[in-house]
């Protein structure tokens, strides 16, 4: 007798930028095996226990474009509207740092059962404490985007830097 698979959790993405939903092809072609998926959206779409039901970005056009690209029906430019309308089980937050703690607190206070948030969590201890208090008070599960920092390659690079084997920093390149 076969049993039906458990229902998939309804997931939503808040933040439709590079780490949220748009991994550049150049990056995809150069990262080591085992690092995919890179973006929050890719990770949710790759998980058979999740159904990505909505995306949100403060830039309405970015949310609409991302929804269309990912085949997601609902897009929003206000995370509060997304949470109230869609009532997701879980959310993934890939926004700029400012406002992340507000999103975490609001989500916890409004029935979201699980939250994954990228780093850094907030800009101050006060912001972080407010968000974490809401999570604790409402029994919301929270994961924090630092998992790659424990990968062997990061540990190796850190030890090489500490040992002075890499040399002097000459350039930092940031991609958006």
Image (spheres, grey):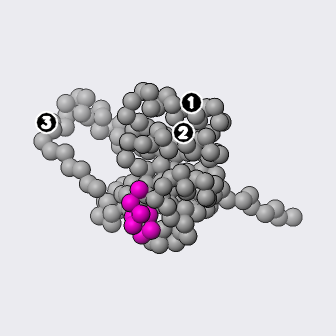
Give the farthest residue toward the right.
Answer: 1
153 lies left or right of 77: left
Magenta residues, start to end: 58-65
Q: Are marks 2 and 1 in contact (CB under 8 Å)?
A: yes
Residue 38: % across, % down: 42, 56
Q: Earlier in the sequence, mark 2 or mark 1?
A: 2
Residue under pointer 3: 168
Whether residue 62 is in magenta: the answer is yes
Q: Is residue 63 magenta?
A: yes
Per the model, the C-alpha gap separating discs 2 and 1 is: 8 Å
How crowded pointer 3 is (Cα within 10 Å; few <14, some 14-19, many 20+) is rated as few
> What whole-number distance in Å separates the C-alpha atoms at marks 3 and 2?
41 Å
Q: Position of residue 132 (x, y in %)?
A: 54, 32
Label 2: element kind = helix
Q: Is residue 97 left or right of residue 129?
A: left
Work out whether residue 84 can be spotted: yes
Taking the image as shown, residue 160 lies to the left or right of residue 60, namely left
Number of other residues with Cα within 10 Å of mark 1, as a class: few under 14, some 14 to 19, many 20 or more: few
Q: Earlier in the sequence, mark 1 or mark 3?
A: 1
User: For this rendering, which residue is in front, 54 or 21?
Assistant: 54
Q: Is residue 28 above or below residue 169?
A: below
| Quarter-of-image position of residue 108 | top right
Q: Which residue is mark 2?
A: 105
Q: Residue at x 72, y 59 (%)?
A: 7
Q: Which residue is mark 1?
A: 133
The foreground one among 14 and 3 is: 14
- The span from disc 1 to disc 3 (Cα, nearest Å) is 42 Å
> Which numbered disc, 3 or 2, marks the residue that appears first in the sequence?
2
């Amino acid at each position: 007798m076969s049993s039906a698979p458990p229902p998939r959790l309804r997931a939503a993405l808040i933040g439709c930028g590079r780490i949220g939903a748009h991994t550049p092809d150049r990056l995809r072609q150069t990262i080591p095996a085992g690092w995919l998926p890179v973006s929050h959206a890719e990770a949710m779409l790759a998980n058979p226990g999740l159904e990505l039901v909505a995306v949100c970005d403060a830039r309405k056009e970015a949310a609409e474009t991302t929804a269309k690209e990912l085949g997601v029906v609902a897009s929003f430019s206000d995370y509060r509207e997304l949470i109230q309308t869609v009532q997701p089980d879980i959310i993934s937050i890939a926004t700029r740092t400012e406002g992340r703690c507000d999103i975490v607190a609001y989500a916890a206070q409004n029935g979201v059962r699980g939250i994954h948030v990228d780093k850094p969590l907030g800009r101050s201890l006060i912001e972080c404490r407010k968000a974490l208090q809401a999570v604790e008070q409402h029994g919301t599960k929270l994961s924090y985007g630092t998992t790659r920092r424990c990968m062997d390659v990061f540990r190796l690079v850190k030890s090489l830097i500490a040992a002075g084997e890499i040399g002097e920093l000459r350039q930092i390149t940031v991609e958006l």
